[in-house]
Image (cartoon, rainbow, N blue to C red):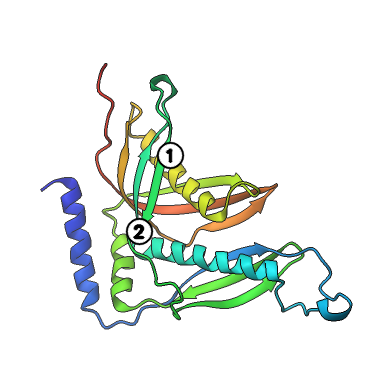
Amino acid sequence: MTANGIKRWILCTVLTLFMASSIPALPIEGEFWVIADLLELNLPGSNSRTIDELSPREEDALATLIEDARWAFSGMIYGFSVRWTPPAQNRNVAENLQIRPLALIPRGDPRLKTLSTMRETRLIHFLLGYSLDETQAARLEGWQSAVFPSAGGFGRVSLYYGSRREAMEAGIRDALYQWLRLREYNRPREITGRVAFTQFPVTSLDNGFFTALVHLKLDLDSPRPYFAD
């Protein structure tokens, strides 16, 4: 059995053991934010609103935030498939990064809830929680196995031309790069495999950039090398 086969066998074994357990799963939590409108909250006439109300633009931003949270929680429970071609200028190879969830929490799942909100001058913070069923708890626990190596990365994209999702994806790419650069002497042609968040990504706003700090477990295939010309 190959190393990757052993890893997958261990993951399946852990999943089976946990699916048989009756221990209730604790909810998982994470925080995202939206940029607050810098207009006065209490305007004359029909435009007035209280500090707890969201503007139409903030409501739209919250809808995007919920979708990003659904993606991130799914990345903790199920993980992602990844396919990364690092850039190689000397070979005229452009970078290509594909990150796809292995499964997604259903849109509108009532177990995904907003637990609390906190408004600052610049940002509105939302604490989100997702209640796991037994199967999801088993998958989450399976990814925590020591057989899977850990890696961390930092992503940064423009606030004006990018998104929080793209910052998280850039963090995944950086984690792959940081882990591989210490183990692969030659630049690989392609990296494939699976990864999962070990905790909810930490995102922030920094001088006009979305930033994301991510922590991963890795289940990667052997790197595909370049062959000698």
Q: Is residue 46 above or below residue 28?
A: below
Q: Position of residue 219 (x, y in %)?
A: 29, 50
Tell me: 57 left or right of 151: right
**Along the line of sight, the residue nearer the viewer: 152 or 108:** 108
Tell me: 19 left or right of 163: left
Which quarter of the image is occupied by the C terminus? top left
Quadrant of the rendered structure where residue 96 is? top left
- SS class, disc 1: helix
What residue lies at 40% left-to-right and 60% top-to-bottom? 75
Quadrant of the rendered structure where residue 132 is? bottom left
Mark 1 is on which residue type? Answer: Gln
Q: Looking at the image, which residue sits at the far front?
A: 46
Could you give the CA–CA distance between mark 2 and mark 1, rounded to whole angstroms?
Answer: 19 Å
Q: Position of residue 97 (x, y in %)?
A: 41, 42
Mark drawn on residue 163:
none
**Along the line of sight, the residue nearer the viewer: 126 or 98:** 98
Q: Nearer the viewer, mark 2 or mark 1?
A: 2
Q: Residues within 10 Å of mark 2 (few under 14, many from 20)?
A: many
- Which residue in the structure is indicated by mark 2? 79
Q: Is residue 15 above or below residue 187?
A: below
- SS class, disc 2: loop
Q: Are marks 2 and 1 in contact (CB under 8 Å)?
A: no
Q: Position of residue 4 (x, y in %)?
A: 20, 48
**Along the line of sight, the residue nearer the viewer: 115 or 229:** 229
Q: Residues within 10 Å of mark 1 (few under 14, many from 20)?
A: some
Q: Is residue 62 visible?
A: yes
Label located before the other in sequence (2 or 1): 2
Mark 2 is on which residue type? Answer: Gly
Q: Looking at the image, which residue sits at the far left?
A: 1
- Which residue in the structure is indicated by mark 1? 178
What residue lies at 39% left-to-right and 46% top-to-bottom? 98
Q: Is residue 31 visible?
A: no
